[in-house]
Image: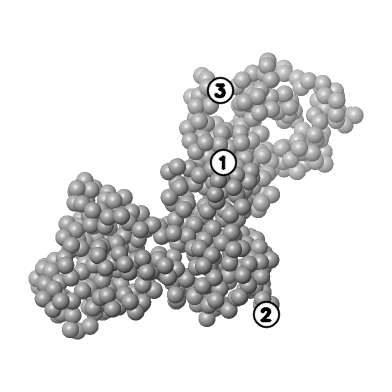
Amino acid sequence: MTFSDYRYKAQPALGRTALITQLQRELARRNISLTGPRGTGKSCVVRALAAHSVTKQMFNAIVFCELKGRGIDGDETFYEALIQDIRQQLPPEASTEWLDPNLESPVEEKLNTTVDDWESAGHKVLFILDGIDDAFVSLQTAWSFLCNFVERAPVTFLCISRKRIRELCNTREKRDSLMSDRFKNPIDIQPMTVEDIMAILQIGGVGSSGVAPALLSASGGNPSLVIALCEEASKLADTVPLEVELINAAAQAIVQERAEELELIWQDLDPDERDVFITAGRTGNVTTPSNGARKLKCLGLLTSAGGNLKPTCRLMQDFGAGAAKGTVLLKEWFGTEASYLNSMKQVLAMRLGPKMDEECELVSNVRDAIESLERPDKASRAFRDIAEEALNVIWDVESPSHMVPALRSGPPWLKVERRWPENRSGLVELLDAMTDDRKWESSPKKANRKHFILIAHIQEAGDFKNHQNGVDMTSAFLVATAASAVELVNEMRAVGLV
């Protein structure tokens, strides 16, 4: 069996036999809610649970109802999916004749009558509802029925979701229904351990003892990433044994060529959770956001102790540092806290003062750019807009008679007050990004007065947070905004995002 086959057949459930044993023990006495973010192997585990011999001995019948991707948008479609799966998966002796679609009785009555027959016959039935997130939110009157249905003696429910059931109660009626009390103490799926990963490697015929720890370090114990790494490393290995060096090479290949798994996980993270990997990739330290600790733990992406980076998922570090390169740079200018958008708005109001309303286009550009940070294709255009608008505002604010101070460098034919500042290569990059034109590199004569004023301001003002005395605050802020936008565009271009 290949690793690709293993992903879908899930035998024996990504090696997590301990979790299956725990679920079997809990199902013997109560309904269960199994929660965890996307890609953590929830469906793989419960499918293996349903096929396990011990589970089959515990229940007379098992109904696996996959709710994802079935267009469930309300009570009717939910009932249709539930009844269809019961009729298809239960044997004839399970009294499914009451669920005949030709019977005109209400669907709730059909289900209750069926359960009455199960109870009379002493049957125990396990219902596995996989992917309940969207389905539960769409329920109306069926919600009340379901609250009572899960309490019936012959049935036991195992619900699988990304969010906890109490978070899916999106109306007052649902919150008052005590549905979450029917599924107390939800089980959060945990990251894979070294032992779990070794079980997978045995399926693939890998015997090297050092490979499992390397996989855990690179993936953080996230099942999707473990399998992806195994598959990629196997391609690289071909006929040679799977060794640690190939795991490291596979990690680099996934970040560069197979980012689908990483992108799905990245999209599931909140901004402050993404900051963990953006910051970790740059500084080597991990600071876990208090409100994101549970999700990161469930994802298996944050297994470090004491804030050290070594055991933390390398794949997400590399992905975060690359895909969010612009985020890193912008936060260096505008603050690293999760609320930097609000901070940016405050800075705009403070620095621009009465021009806050007057220059609304610049304010809008900054807001759009920040809100588009995770969409580099859109963000790069917004950052260029910031630079262009800031340049125009600077030109309007400054006196037309303003002259660039005498500078020590520049071509001899240029008058002293118009010479290029030091670090000419950086200015070429700046002007290129501002104008999307390489003409400055070959012919500095074509640089006009507006660009020299911009250059002078950048040289004098630098970072707006540490501006020099005597430099107009508004101009300094605008220059810093433009400079940060240019830096951002260049960095994004360097990593192939624009």
Q: Tell me where residue 197 appears, x and y as whole percent.
A: 53, 68
Q: Residue at x 61, y 75 (%)?
A: 207
Q: Identify the amino acid type marked 3.
A: Arg
Residue 355 is tagged as none
Q: Nearer the viewer, mark 1 or mark 2?
A: 2
Q: In the image shown, does 138 or 452 lie closer to the viewer? A: 138
Is residue 4 rendered to the left or right of residue 33?
right
Closer mark to the observer between disc 3 and disc 2: 2
Residue 462 sits above or below residue 283 on the image: above
Q: Which residue is mark 3?
A: 351
Q: Which numbered marker is on residue 239?
A: 2
Q: Earlier in the sequence, mark 3 or mark 1?
A: 3
| N-term-proximal mark, 1 vs 2 | 2
Distance, label 3 to label 1, CA atoms, is 20 Å
Determine the secondary structure under disc 1.
helix
Q: How is the image coloured?
A: one colour
